Amino acid sequence: MSVPPSLATPYRTHTCGALRADDAGTTARLAGWVHRRRDYGKLIFIDLRDRHGMTQVVIDAADAPEAHETATRLRSEFVVGFQGEVALRQPGTENPKLATGAIELQARSVTILNEAKTPPFYVNEPDAPIDESVRLKYRYLDIRREQMQRRLVLRSRLVQAIRQVHHDNGFVEVETPNLIKSTPEGARDFIVPSRLQPGTVYALPQSPQQLKQLLMVAGVDRYFQIARCFRDEDMRGDRQPEFTQLDLEMSFVDEPALMAFVEQMVIEVTHATAPERPFREVPFPVFEYAEAIERFGSDKPDVRFAMQLFDVAPALTGADGTPASGFRVFDETLGAGDRVKGITAPGLGGATRREIDELTETAKRFGAKGLVHLAVEAGGELGGPIAKFLAPDTRLAIRELAQAGEGDLILLVADRAATTNDVLGRLRVDLAARLGLADPDELAHCWVHRFPMYQWDAEGGRWDATHNPFSGVLPDDESLLTTVSGDLDDRSPDDPAGRARAMQYDIVLNGWELGGGSIRIWDPTLLARSFNLQGYTLEQMRERFGAILEAFEYGAPPHGGIAIGIDRWAALLSYQTNIREVMAFPKTQSGSDLMLEAPSPPEESQYSELGLRFVGAPQRP
Ligand code: ASP
């Protein structure tokens, strides 16, 4: 154990969380904020708070009349200094919930260091409901609250542990600039007009991707950075226009070596940051993308609970493989080459009509045309509106595929493969939340890898990189990086490229994509091929990725990396589902900073210096 640093200053001998029974009889000076004040006339009690804790201070008119006189003026959130004697509390009045609860400071003198207006919300009520916009406008008061302090401290420990583990493993921390050229990660760029070169702009990095790869060409070997990234996209609970990534890149690694380092790093960092949280499974389970979709209906499966998707087709087809269930929707779906799949909700067999309607509505909101339900009744028979259409054998086979027992509810979706998987995948998460299937303490990591390299972009007539335009292709699939005609400019949805799998991996935690990365294409010819399939002309390639293409002609080592969202990681370790809860100064859904009132119109002179003119906001249709 390291010795805690002394936080003594001219204002205090101790913090508000430090004094214990052992200190009784000594004198101490404390400084902090008035958390609560109880005025009993001759006796005034103050709960004095700082980040480190709280100490009860008592000011007795009989012992210290002058201090008592000053203390009558104290109000919530005043900043105060006290000096006095540490004393054991009266027997029976100790507060076991408080680390300092055995003692109190009997004040001899009181100094009001600063007064405070009445805050717009109770800083001292942890459970008071406060509108988030008020919290964001007065973030400095919000952060005074214990839960925010706790989260920011956890986040600080997280970053400290990340730095430690990387330094221990031969990484160099390198800062990369924020004023750069566009590095696409699938979002819109934020741009910054240049004053010195009118008519040109910098882009804020969506990630340091190109720069970290250039650092590998530069021989840095192992790089990491706590990097700020900027992406102009619509916001959700797990997104912000600027966010922080642990960005890393390693040379002379293949996919297993990289994943092994990252997994070990994640384990060590978690132990250092939140040692009490149990891991569900180590080593982390690894799923191929196609398998994750098939089993969990998601490429970021929450593996804290099972409830896996099952294929109903074997129960619905005859011996010759033709659909013969007797239920038209199923037969037509399978006949068209689409999918019928299901999940089993344990114990929901007795769901009321209203609950079933609600589930059906949810499934429709997720994109399903409908939701079929079958309840396992007493004796194992299946009940539900469509049960009568199905032969007894079919019903039995469905129940077996569903691994459903008495009292369970089987939910089925029949649709195109992508819709079926997606709807059931979301329903799985939704039901698990309703049924409380996940242990909230548990940390369930997994890897998903071998994503498709590309997806067809019909509008652009090109193969869009699914993740990162620099991702490498699995060596086995390298020959697929081509088109039907062999001409890379003549692309179509049937091209072999659509079947190529990338050396790309995501790390998932409790159903959230924590991070993702890839082993890169380091061979300039193959990279040019991949860019070509992505629809970049030679000229566009030079313009957008000129530096990297050129650098690769000077000897690029095999390399790969990953980026892990620090905001998401800190949120999950703090039991939060919204990353704003672990960011000191986040923005609202519409991208506003309510405290600083940003964004705001520029000064007239800023326009002219930049050679810009505002021509009005685009009309919304
Ligand atoms: N640059 C990627 C991202 O920000 C991560 C990586 O491939 O290393 O998502």
Image (cartoon, rainbow, N blue to C red):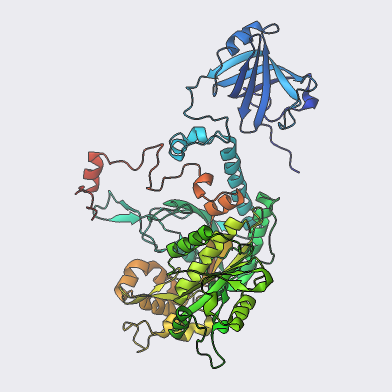
> Looking at the figure, which quarter contains the C terminus?
bottom left
**Total numbered labels:** 0
Which residue is more in the foreground, 47 or 441? 441
Q: Quadrant of residue 31?
A: top right
* 133, above or below 239, in the image: above
Most extreme residue toward the bottom, as rendered? 320
- Comparing 538 with 17, the one in front is 17
Image point 58% across, 20% down: which residue?
80
- Looking at the picture, does residue 360 appear above or below residue 90? below
Q: Is residue 177 visible?
A: yes
- Can you say which quadrant of the picture contains the N terminus? top right
Along the viewing direction, whichever of 180 and 94 lies nearer the viewer: 94
Would you say residue 500 is visible in this rendering?
no
Taking the image as shown, residue 142 lies to the left or right of residue 465, namely right
Q: Position of residue 413 (x, y in %)?
A: 49, 72
| 87 left or right of 448 in image | right
Q: Position of residue 149 (x, y in %)?
A: 58, 38
Image coords of residue 237 (percent x, y): 47, 52
Q: At x 56% / y 79%, what residue is drawn?
A: 312
Q: Is residue 518 left or right of residue 462?
A: right
Instruction: Say above or below: 140 vs 469.
Output: above
Residue in the picture at 46% in, 77% down: 523
